[in-house]
Image: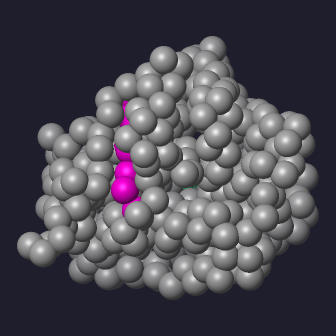
Amino acid sequence: MKRLLITGGSGFIGSHTCVVLLKQGYELYVLDSHCNSHPKVIDRVVKITGDEESSTINKVFLIEGDLRDQNLLNKLFSDSIYQGKPIEGVIHFAGLKSVQESTANPLLYWDSNVNGSINLLRSMDQFDCRTIVFSSSATIYGASKKSFLPETSPINPLNPYGQTKLAVEKLLRDVFKSSPNKWRISNLRYFNPIGAHSSGEIGEDPLGIPNNLFPFITQVAAGRREKLTIFGKDWPTLDGTCIRDYIHVMDLAEGHLLALECLLAEEPQLMNLNLGTGLGTSVLELVNTFQSVNNLEMPYEFASRRKGDVPQIIADNSMALSRLHWNPSRNLEDMCRDGWKWQTLNPKGYL
Ligand code: NAD
Ligand code: UFG
């Protein structure tokens, strides 16, 4: 079976994608520095995917290291060729993702996200591996009057994190243009991934106080945080709270498998695809669904709007649906149930 390199495969989205890829029979090299994850994650991935007959333990190799280490990257590619099993594609999740931290420390973000990606592409080119799926983000889109954002929406990231995502997309476009008959590239622009694998074995495990809504909700419900603060109740939406396009992380993971297989099957190309459900949910709707599905109550209060937020972001996902034959089928209830199962089974994350 094909061997792939998964950068950042111990992280939230990467680990769920490893599950999907292993179930499909791929062999994986996972490269992760563990600056924002725990190596134990891969044991859990093996636990979910292995069965008594066909253990996946021999199909996933974890390498602890940083993308900015060019020698390490070269060694991974050259060792694979030497073993007669070259790396045939890369899914590139590794990167730093906190908007606040990127504003405080832009040098760190440009170095890790952009220089790390340059190193990766350099090694890929050198060792003739030119298929890559990149974790981009809806955060690169600027203000738009449209209710649903297509891939052609105006691009204007508002913070250094978003700038680094856009910079890598631009880099990939230039690399593609330099040899359009060789490169196969997919930029996947994620909307708001939440939830967890239905087993409760893997999930989102943020370091410190969560910045994002969903892990904050699960930690308040678990009693780890006192209450949720909802930023703004005067937005121009039906209930006054912001609307986002929440997508189950397993649907997102399946989108990666389909994007990779589409690239491997078709002619060289570059595609930009939105991965979202196309459905909007307000903060209050998410809180209420979480409470009712899990039969609990959680304290929350309203505060003023958070700087940089916009009232509504929903994907026009028609391109991904038709190009990939992708079917994001898990609903908000599934996201809330699975995310809560992960939290209750792992009150302190992977520790
Ligand atoms: P995550 O932090 O859980 O996973 C990223 C992984 O990359 C971590 O395991 C981290 O240790 C590793 N890593 C970071 N820098 C590295 C480096 N220089 N070398 C090697 N490993 C490194 O994040 P996630 O939520 O799984 O996100 C995965 C990707 O998707 C990121 O690139 C992120 O920017 C992007 N993305 C995430 C979201 C989201 O809401 N989670 C939305 C849009 C885009
Ligand atoms: N929110 C709260 N309270 C909180 C946290 C968030 O009310 O404690 C609100 C926010 O104001 C926003 C909504 O919940 O209205 C969602 O906020 P998140 O921080 O969970 O998500 P964002 O849409 O702001 O951004 C996320 C990631 C970005 C990514 C983007 C993709 O943080 O990195 O989704 O659209 F790029």
Q: Position of residue 169 (x, y in %)?
A: 76, 42
Q: Is residue 191 left or right of residue 206?
A: right
Q: Position of residue 297 (x, y in %)?
A: 27, 70
Q: Residue at x 61, y 19 (%)?
A: 111
Q: Is residue 335 left or right of residue 263?
A: left
For residue 290, above or below residue 272: below
Q: Residue at x 38, y 80 (%)?
A: 334
Q: Residue at x 72, y 36 (%)?
A: 168
Residue closer to the observer: 250 or 262: 262
In the picture, the quarter occupied by the N terminus is bottom left
In the picture, the quarter occupied by the C terminus is top left
Q: Position of residue 9 (x, y in %)?
A: 40, 46
Write down the region rendered in magenta. Answer: 26-35
The quarter of the picture where residue 83 lies is: top left
Outermost residue, left side:
52
For residue 40, above or below residue 316: above
For residue 23, above or below residue 100: below
Residue closer to the observer: 323 or 150: 323
